[in-house]
Image (cartoon, rainbow, N blue to C red):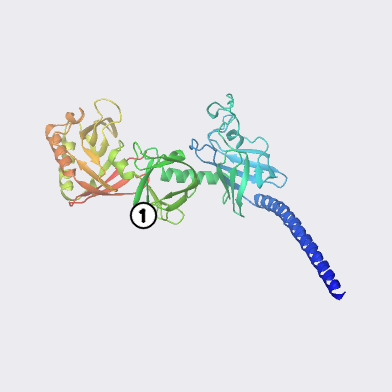
Amino acid sequence: MMKKDIRTIALGVALTATALTSCARFEEEDLFEESAALRIEHNTDKLQDILVDAPDGWVMQYYTGRGEAVFEGFNLFAKFEKSGKVLMAGDHRYLRDGHANQYTEAASLYEIIREDGLVLAFNTWNDILTPFVDPVAYWAAPNVLLKDGAGMEGDQNLVVTSMSENEITFRGERYSAQIRMVKADRDWQTYLADTKAMKERITSDAINSYYITADGTTMYCVGLRDGRYRISERVKNPLQTDSISCCFTPTGFRNESVSTLAGHSFQEFTLNEDGSALVNEDGTVRIVATWDTYLAEADDIFWLDGESLTGDLKTLYDQLIPALEAANKVYFPRIGIGRSTKQAGDNNVPGLVVEWYTVRRSLTLQNMRRGGLTMERSVPAMGQMTISYQENATSDNDFQELPESVQTLIRDFAAALATTYQMTPNSNFAPTEVTLSAINGNSSFRLAKETE
């Protein structure tokens, strides 16, 4: 009897324990589900607080969803209110109603939506953002509606992928562009002005290709000034191209996504302290313009500073200039390297350029002439230039207006210039001055581009 009671009691205890365990597990599951819901609610509140707590608002580095990087990145601005109102601003080229490329502000509404995660939704029309979302042909907006409704493939619903007090990252809900917001550290128009100044410092109309280097590997970036560029093995006729969109910043530029070169990752480039290169986050990847190729191929004239000449070149120069000045109707001559004229026709000789005036009236000089003598330029190695001269080098008609003896001195000077030089520019991005030092000789000189 006692044994039976013990078995009965044991069974009862086991059943009770099982019931308690099941109950506890159910309660834990309920708790976990409730915790997840609370977590989303708390994150919603947190996102709302972060958005509003930005005295100068946010800089939004905005990209559209086209995989082939048809469009550059855009700097937009946003300031959020707890009421659901947002003030946005920008100066991009797709602003409408005559505002293209002009600083413009526009207010609208926003909402934080809880889906699989948090979504920041700009759910009413905003003149700054909505043109990227509007299903019309961007080249004829707003008159041409596209059948597929894609437009510029922009997103107004942004899925939050990470957030902190100073930075929020998103994925476009429909087209998956990577979008980033950082707290503005200055007023918006100052940010745009500082960004424009940096863009002008590191890019130019004359140079739009760059060396990108890491651990002895060198490739080329082409098209950076356009806000979208490709990385390739060579500048012309590349074998491989990767198209990348970027936003310029007051300190450099930032790509939409992370890329790699020689095993090193990069996304954001900052101009280093001495202004010699753009460097990535850990300093392992560097970018400088192909300024040496530009100087070797430039049509722009870089004028020779006579005071900077040394060696044999100085001796010849000191003979040439007085001879020019003594020639009939030659006033204020100077010598440069470039192209005698950019116009098509006879006066279109690349190489050595001689400029002078034929009329001097009081303090006024008139009828400027430029004579050209063909000299070839090339880049044998990064930062070097080889100048070549042939005795039968061609010249243009203006050159032939000079006395025969002066033409001979010019050719002697050209022959003395012919060697390989190490070049030191005043800027690795948009040089206006460069010092050339002969690698196997004692001659050096400075060239300067005339600035308006």
Side of 93 relative to 390 (left or right): right
Going 30% across and 30% down the picture, which residue do you hit? Answer: 342
Q: Which residue is mark 1?
A: 215
Q: Position of residue 274 (x, y in %)?
A: 39, 55
Residue 271 visible, this angle: no
Look at 41% across and 45% down and name the residue there. Answer: 202
Q: Nearer the viewer, residue 293 or 351?
A: 293
Query: Is 435 situated left or right of 121 in this image?
Result: left
Question: Is residue 428 placed above or below 399 in the rendered structure?
Answer: below
User: Residue drawn 55% across and 27% down?
Assistant: 137
Q: Position of residue 70 (x, y in %)?
A: 49, 35
Q: Nearer the viewer, residue 112 or 452?
A: 112
Tell me which amino acid carries mark 1: Asp
Q: Quadrant of the N terminus?
A: bottom right
Q: Quadrant of residue 175?
A: top right
Q: Position of residue 21 (x, y in %)?
A: 77, 63
